Image (cartoon, grey):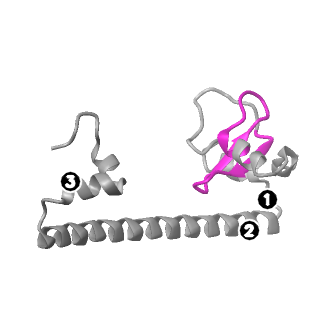
Amino acid sequence: MFKPGETFIEILLHERRLKTYTSELSLEELSEAIQKLTRVFEQRQKEASEKELAAQRKRQHIEEIQRFIKDNGLDPADVVSELGGGTAHGSRSSKSAPAKYACTDEYGNVVTWSGKGRRPKAFNDKIEAGAKIEDFKLPN
């Protein structure tokens, strides 16, 4: 059915190719295909909306926690260490340098960095967006 090297996506996204491949379908079959594609599209939209809403809620909760930490004079590094983590993915088994910087990643996880070694992606993303590394410095 497909020409060698052609993929379904290439056909679907190219109007002339799509017209060629669907020319043998009856109007009823074409209508059925449109309905199915519409259902797939609507489901993907719904999933994307739900995912964005969940991420938004998570960001709001993190902002509330950050305000709470600031308003109560707590040290973010102490909070992170009490929770048992040094990074967004848990702490390492070996001793690591104390965190000097903290920020949240795109998923709302707190990421800390000692200022030594490779800078975590979350920090790089924020710096590329215009922030300065000093913005993330933890109080001593």
The Cα–Cα distance between marks 1 and 3, rounded to whole angstroms, is 64 Å
Question: Circle 3: is it few (<14), some (14-19), or many (20+) Cα within 10 Å?
Answer: some
The Cα–Cα distance between marks 2 and 1, rounded to whole angstroms, is 8 Å
Which badge, 2 or 1, comes first in the chain's sequence? 2
Residue holding disc 1: 74
Q: Where does the magenta region start and end? A: 99-123
Quick check: 101 left or right of 32?
A: right
Q: Residue 18 location, x and y as percent? A: 28, 56
Of 46 and 28, the residue lying toward us: 28
Q: Please, what is the three-letter code of the amino acid marked with disc 2?
A: Phe
Quick check: 13 left or right of 74?
A: left
Q: Please, what is the three-letter code of the amino acid marked with disc 3?
A: Tyr
Kind of element beneath mark 2: helix
Which badge, 1 or 3, comes first in the chain's sequence? 3
Residue holding disc 3: 21
The Cα–Cα distance between marks 3 and 2, rounded to whole angstroms, is 60 Å
